[in-house]
Image (cartoon, rainbow, N blue to C red):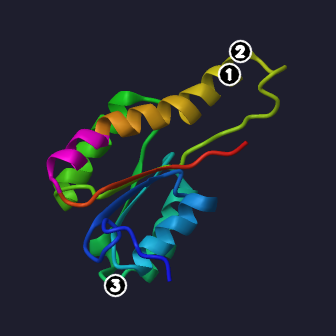
Amino acid sequence: MTPQHPALVKGHVAVITGAASGIGLAAAKAFAQMGLCVVLVDLEGDRLASAAVEVTALASGGEADVVAIGTDVSKLDELEALERAVIQRFGRVHVLMNNAGIQPGSALFGPQANWENVLGVNLMGVVNGTRTFGPGMVAHKDAALIINTGSK
């Protein structure tokens, strides 16, 4: 049996970007089943709301342990507002999963705006998330974990 990371324990707080679908939603469900408080982060909309309902159904504390917050991770000010909201609600963050990612068609031959959007979310979203949440995760001195996902 593989040992579990010490940050992944009941009552700890996980923030997951790109949580409305795919790997992010699967991680949110797994963390909820492990007893973590879960913050689902994605663009505001029906998919995020639906994901929150699914994760809440699995969380031992129900709505008290799950919150969905619409955020554009390419925008530093939105991530800073997200951190403030999470700290106000849960007090601290133990797990940050930088998972948000986009691929709007062919980036190589597509418009410049596609490149800017892809780099804004896929690169700067990770940088912004880590720079925003990392210092507080180090400062509280509890076990902490930053997970960065990507694709080829």
Residue corresponding to mark 2: 112
- Disc with the residue nearer the chain's start (3 vs 1): 3
Q: CA–CA distance between discs 3 and 1? A: 41 Å
Task: Check disc 2 and give the amino acid type.
Answer: Gln
Above or below, 91 relative to 35: above
- Report the disc number at residue 115: 1
Can residue 21 be seen by looking at this rendering? Answer: no
The image position of residue 91, as x and y in percent, is 16, 57
Q: Is residue 60 left or right of residue 100?
A: left
Q: Few, some or many C-alpha atoms within 10 Å of disc 3 (few <14, some 14-19, many ≥20)? A: some
Task: Verify CB contact (< 8 Å) between mark 3 and mark 1.
Answer: no
Can residue 99 be seen by looking at this rendering? Answer: yes
Task: Verify CB contact (< 8 Å) between mark 1 and mark 2.
Answer: yes
Task: Check disc 1 and give the amino acid type.
Answer: Trp
Q: CA–CA distance between discs 2 and 3? A: 45 Å
- Disc with the residue nearer the chain's start (2 vs 3): 3
Q: Nearer the viewer, residue 144 or 118?
A: 144
The image quadrant of residue 145 is bottom left
Above or below, 66 relative to 44: below
Q: Residue furthest top?
A: 112
**Residue 137 falls inside the magenta stretch:** yes
Residue corresponding to mark 3: 60
